Image (cartoon, grey):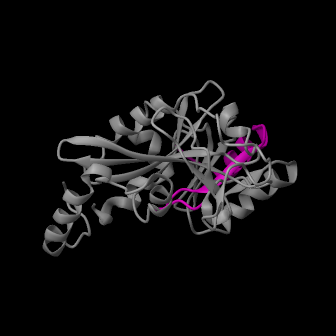
């Protein structure tokens, strides 16, 4: 893990440069270094930014672009003319960078549990020597009227099996076992997520492009056509606790070997984990 480079790689305004061959939410506007940019990252004036926003159909999602661990902090939904009118003043009042994107229409297996939030797959991959290993996936669902699915906002999580089916039970924010969504009351049992295998392969193959990072948590949505959409890349503070609660030891059969090597190597480097 190279912490010095992490923030540059997790910048959502840079995802399309790094992964131009993937599906992304449609970008409308960018706010970078306190200046406005269009979807192609060309600098534009404030007047041009206002014109773009006024011509765009809402709902839109506004989110900070530089974060190393997710969490859904400061994510906003623009769903009215008043929201659109207040966007530019809001951005100018902030010191952080933002991206404004069209809201994703997600597939039925994910939206049925809670339709107000974008419900995602948190997929964990690991570089082991020259191989990229798939480790674990949890599905995350937001609560009623929430627009995000993260645990910090009260969201719930559940294991996704290798065939894309959900476990029969998941966990609440406080790690209480539940067999259905607490608001929609939809049971988890019997749900299979279309597009899951494609999402996992996407993460494995693209991890190869990121040689500085051995452990990566990918947030992937599935759209109405069951195609994976890259939402976020998490490199630091990856919340591996809910992977282990849902799916057991993080590294599975590799656990003992990796722990031994970590103990041996950690004193030789300023980073907690070296290359395996």
What residue appears at the point 75 percent right and 43 percent down from the top-left corner?
Answer: 186
What residue appears at the point 27 percent right and 57 percent down from the top-left corner?
Answer: 255
Query: Dividing the image into 4 quarters, which one contains the C terminus?
Result: bottom left
* Rendering coords of residue 156 (x, y %): 64, 56
Kindly tell me whether residue 2 is visible in this rendering. Answer: yes
What residue appears at the point 62 percent right and 31 percent down from the top-left corner?
Answer: 223
Q: Is residue 63 magenta?
A: yes
Question: Magenta residues, as a range?
Answer: 42-71
**Residue 84 shown left or right of residue 262 in the figure:** right
* Rendering coords of residue 173 (x, y %): 64, 64
* Rendering coords of residue 182 (x, y %): 76, 54
- Name the residue at the bottom extreme: 267
Between residue 205 and residue 10, name the one nearer to us: 205
Between residue 150 and residue 250, name the one nearer to us: 250
What residue appears at the point 39 percent right and 53 percent down from the top-left corner?
Answer: 9
Q: How many marks?
A: 0
Kindly tell me whether residue 72 is visible in this rendering. Answer: no
**Residue 54 shown left or right of residue 220 in the figure:** right
* Rendering coords of residue 85 (x, y %): 82, 54
In the rendered image, the vertical position of residue 141 relative to residue 193, given as above or below = below
Between residue 85 and residue 208, name the one nearer to us: 208
Between residue 67 and residue 148, name the one nearer to us: 148
């Amino acid at each position: 893990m190279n912490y010095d480079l992490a923030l540059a790689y997790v910048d959502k305004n840079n995802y399309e440069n790094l992964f131009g061959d993937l599906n992304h939410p449609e970008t409308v506007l960018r706010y970078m270094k306190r200046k406005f940019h269009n979807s192609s990252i060309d600098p534009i004036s404030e007047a041009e930014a206002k014109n773009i926003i006024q011509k765009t159909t809402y709902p839109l999602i506004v989110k900070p672009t530089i974060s190393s661990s997710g969490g859904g902090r400061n994510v906003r939904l623009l769903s009215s003319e008043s929201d659109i009118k207040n966007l530019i003043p809001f951005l100018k009042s902030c010191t952080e960078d933002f991206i404004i994107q069209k809201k994703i229409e997600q597939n039925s297996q994910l939206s049925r549990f809670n339709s107000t939030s974008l419900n995602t797959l948190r997929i964990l991959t690991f570089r082991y020597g020259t191989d990229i290993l798939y480790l674990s996936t949890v599905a995350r669902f937001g609560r009623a009227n929430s627009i995000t699915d993260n645990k910090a906002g009260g969201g719930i999580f559940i294991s996704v099996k290798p065939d894309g089916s959900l476990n029969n039970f998941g966990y609440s924010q406080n790690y209480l076992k539940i067999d259905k969504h607490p608001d929609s009351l939809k049971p988890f049992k019997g749900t299979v997520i279309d597009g899951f295998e494609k999402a996992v392969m996407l993460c494995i193959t693209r991890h190869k492009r990121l040689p500085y990072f051995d452990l990566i948590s990918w947030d992937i949505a599935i759209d109405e056509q069951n195609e994976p959409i890259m939402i976020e890349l998490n490199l630091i503070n990856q919340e591996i606790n809910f992977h282990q609660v849902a799916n057991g030891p993080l590294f599975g059969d590799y656990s003992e070997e990796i722990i031994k090597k970590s103990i041996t190597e950690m004193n030789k480097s300023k980073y907690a984990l070296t290359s395996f």
